[in-house]
Amino acid sequence: MLSLGIETSCDETALALVDEGRVLEEVMFSQVDKHSIFGGVVPEMASREHLRKLQPLWQSLQQKSGRRAGELELIAVARGPGLLGCLLVGLGFAKGLAMSLKIPLVGVNHLHAHLMAPALEQEIEFPAVGLLVSGGHTNLYKINSSIHFELLGRTLDDAAGEAFDKTARALNLPYPGGIYIDRFAEFAEPDPDMFPRPYLDKQSLDFSFSGLKTALVNHIRRNPGLVQKNPLDITPDSTPDPELARVCASFNLAVAETLQVKLQRAVSSTGVRYVILAGGVAANTMIRQKIKEICSRMGLRLILPGLELCTDNASMIAGCGEILASHGLYHDLALEAVPRGRKIPWDYSNGLKD
Ligand code: KG4
Ligand code: ZN
C-alpha cells in the first residue's frame, strides 16, 4: 500500500513515502535554525513555515522517489499531540490530497508513531513495554499490540527532552539543547553525586524532572563560569571546557539512571520480555547505553530505532498509518487536530466514501 506520511506537529515539516512497512523516500525541512534564536519553538512562526514548505517538499518527494500523486493509496497525517496551528496545516494538506485523489485518510497519534517507528527496520514483538522520551512527553506504556497502548506512567511536570533543553538554555547552549549535552558528555566522566535521581522514592511509574532542573540551576548559580558567552559560537562538534563537560555528563547520567529505574519497575510489574525505546531523547548515547545495559541484565529484547527514526519524521507517521489501515481504521474529513494535553479520541471510521 503506497502511503504518504505527513508530519507537522512541531518544528519539522516532513513528508515520506512508505510501502508495506518499507521506507521509500523522506524529505524534511527542519525549522530549528529559525526558532533557535528565540530559545524555543515559536508556534505562530512554526505554522507559517509548515504552510510555506509543504508544497515544495511534496514536489521534491515526487521527484526524488519517481512516484506520482496518482499512485498513492493512503494518506497518513500526524493529528496530535502537538502545536494546534502546526497540526492544522498538516491536516488541511492531508485532507485536500485525500479528497482530490479519492483515497483513504488516517490520522495518526504522533506518540504511537514514535513507538512503532522501529517496525520500519525490524520486527516488533508484543506485549512490550514502551518508553517514549521526547521533547513534550515522557511516557511508559504496556503495548499489547501495534494498535493497543496502555499508559502506565507519565511525567508530572517537565518531559525528559524539555529537561535537556532547559538545562542547555541555563548553560546558554543553543536550542534544542539535548544533542549538545549528549555530545559534550562524552568529554568527561560523570559525577554520580552531582545531581539527584528525581522521584525514585515514589513507587509509581510517573516521572518528575523539575527537581533535577532546579538542582542544575542551583549548581550554575554557584558556578557562574559554566554559562557560555555566545551560543552562536557553539556547535555539537565544539570541544567543551572540562567543567562544562562534567556537568553535561553528570546531568545526562541522572536522566539516564532515572529512566533505567522506572523502566525496570515497569518491566517487573508487567512481566513482559520486550522493550521499545523511542522519541527524540532515545537518540542520546548514554541513555541508549544505559537502557541496553538494563535490558541485557534482565534478559529482555530491546527494540531500538536507528537515530533518524528517533527524532520527528514522517516515515513513522506513514508506517503507523499503514498499521491502522491494515486493521480497517481510517478517518473521514471531520478528522480533528488534538493539541498537547488533550486525550486523543478513538474516533476511527471505516474510511472516506466519495
Ligand atoms: O521526538 P522529538 O524529535 O520531538 C517531539 O516529539 O518532542 O524530540 C525532541 C527532543 C528535544 O527536546 C531534543 O533536545 C531531544 O529530543 N533530543 C535529545 C537528543 N536528540 C534530540 N536529547 C538528548 N540527547 C540527544 N542526542
Ligand atoms: Zn515527536
Image (cartoon, rainbow, N blue to C red):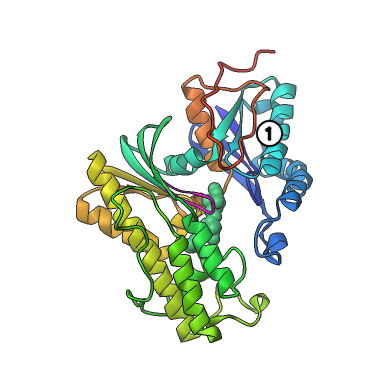
Q: Does residue 191 sit above or below 348 in this rendering?
A: below
Query: x, y (%) of residue 75?
Result: 62, 29
Vertical placement of 222 versus 82: above or below?
below
Q: Residue at x 28, y 50 (%)?
A: 203
Q: Read off the magenta span.
A: 132-139
* Residue most extreme to the top: 354
Residue identifier under label 1: 91
Q: x%, y% of residue 3?
A: 59, 31
Q: Is residue 76 magenta?
A: no
Residue 187 position by quadrant? bottom left
Residue at horizontal 21 percent and vertical 52 percent from the top: 298
Across and down, in percent, residue 51 comes to 77, 43
Above or below 271: residue 218: below
Q: Is residue 113 above or below residue 166?
A: above
Q: Under tag 1, what secondary structure?
A: helix
Left or right of 158: which side holds 124? left
Please, what is the three-letter code of the amino acid marked with disc 1? Answer: Leu
How many other residues sit within 10 Å of disc 1, few (<14), some (14-19) or many (≥20)? many
